[in-house]
Amino acid sequence: STARNLQSKNGKEVLRRTSLGLYRILSRIISAESKRKGTTTNGTSSGYIMLQPPLDHRDYGQARLIDSKKCMLWGNGNNITVLSPPSSSVSDGGESQHGDEYIQKILSFSKNWTENDDAKEEKIVGNFDELFGISPNDDEDNDDEDEDDVNYDDLSLYVSPFDLRCALRKGFHNSFDEDGKDNDNDNDNVTKRDIIHMQRFAIDSINLLEEQLRMNDRTSISTDEERGIRVVAVSKCIGVSSSGHHGLKVGPDVKYRFAYRIRIENFNKPENEEDGSDSECSSTVQLLGRTWKILEDENEYSKSGNDTDVDDQREVNVVAPTTGAVGSLPVIRPGQAFEYMSGCELGSLTGTMSGCFHMAIVDADTECGQVGDPIDAFNLPKDKHFEMEVEPFKLVAEEV
């Protein structure tokens, strides 16, 4: 019996040390990102991180309309430029300025993208949601419209390193406190199986967080506050279009293939949510076309082995103001977002892409169109037309 108790005690200590080590790894990643972004000194919006669904190349060429309220969460409402000073972003109790519900969504986002199908089918999660304080979406006591009915497969969250740190604390609080001491509060129902699963979740979260940070470096967010339109663009290298040697492919005919995902969000309030103020114009918009400027970094030509004249191939312009995007000319109503995935090729390892979407303010009853359909918006007065700028986002082939 004494030997069994000692073995149990030693096993618990091993689990505790492993958990503490994982906690510190995640904490260091968050701290490094915070320092790199400069949030510890100036508190600017550049410190925020977009958590978003990984790009799936199988969605290439696809387009759809989604409910932005269930898929786009910004923390500070629609204001993505204001960040509270670092000293007040986290209270003395270590709580996020966005509230516990927002932290729960960060944990649910992580759970969604780390928990594989086998884990779900084997039901090895134990009391996972209870451990992490995640409120179930099917709360029987909630008779009202479920405001937490978010689609975690599509969800994007705009978070600060402080939010990530609060989520980390919440995720580990049932195992030990920040000093590494066992937390015996409400820990009686936590089993060894639960702790091992939590550690597996932490290990997968390290990979997920590193992937999200790489995606964040290839993401741009553009906002037109006056018209209530926001564009989120992100890219990923999906392959090389030249047959060659294994590994990093070089040569004059090599082209690196990139997929990029665009979300155009209309964050105006739907008509049934308006505060009664009169609006001089409709807040419904239609996407009519796009213009892109794709730049290949000059200093990458020597790396890719391309001896073609740089001045002739460094810039590629796509001017298509009347053909929508991937054949669609969608009408985007308040509370909706239009998402599509397309692609381009570069002769260099890195580059940038920027441009604009050609749009028009239309009546709320306007129907979506396809290329070849008669589109009334093309005949609207010029003051109904506008260009939605898309800030540059990076194209990086380092993962090939």
Image (cartoon, rainbow, N blue to C red):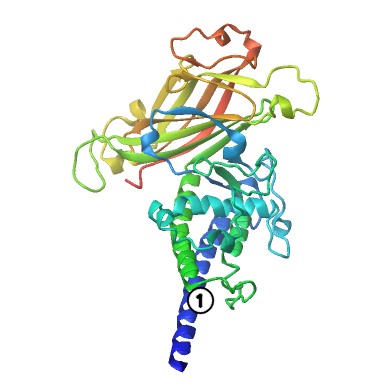
Question: Is residue 400 visible in the rendered structure shown here?
Answer: yes
- Where residue 235 sits: x, y (%)? 43, 38
Q: Horizontally, is 271 left or right of 292 in the view? A: right
**In the depicted view, which residue is nearer to us: 376 or 12?**
12
Q: Residue at x 73, y 65 (%)?
A: 92
Q: In this view, does 66 lie above or below 248?
A: above
Provide the residue designation for mark 1. Answer: 16
- Where residue 284 sits: x, y (%)? 64, 20
Q: Horizontally, is 310 left or right of 186 in the view? A: left
- Where residue 34 sits: x, y (%)? 58, 56
How many marks can you see?
1
Q: Is residue 97 above or below residue 391?
A: below
Q: Horizontally, is 165 left or right of 371 in the view? A: right
Quadrant assignment, res 163: bottom right
Question: Is residue 42 visible in the rendered structure shown here?
Answer: no
Which residue is outermost to the bottom?
2
- Where residue 389 sits: x, y (%)? 56, 27
Q: In this view, does 86 lie above or below 61?
A: below
**In the depicted view, which residue is nearer to us: 53 or 348?**
53
Circle 1 — which element?
helix
Q: Residue at x 46, y 89 (%)?
A: 6
Q: Which residue is drawn at 47% across and 73% down?
A: 18
Amino acid type assigned to the residue bearing label 1 in the image: Arg
Quadrant assignment, res 293: top left
Quadrant occupied by the C terminus? top left
**In the depicted view, which residue is nearer to us: 103 or 320?**
103
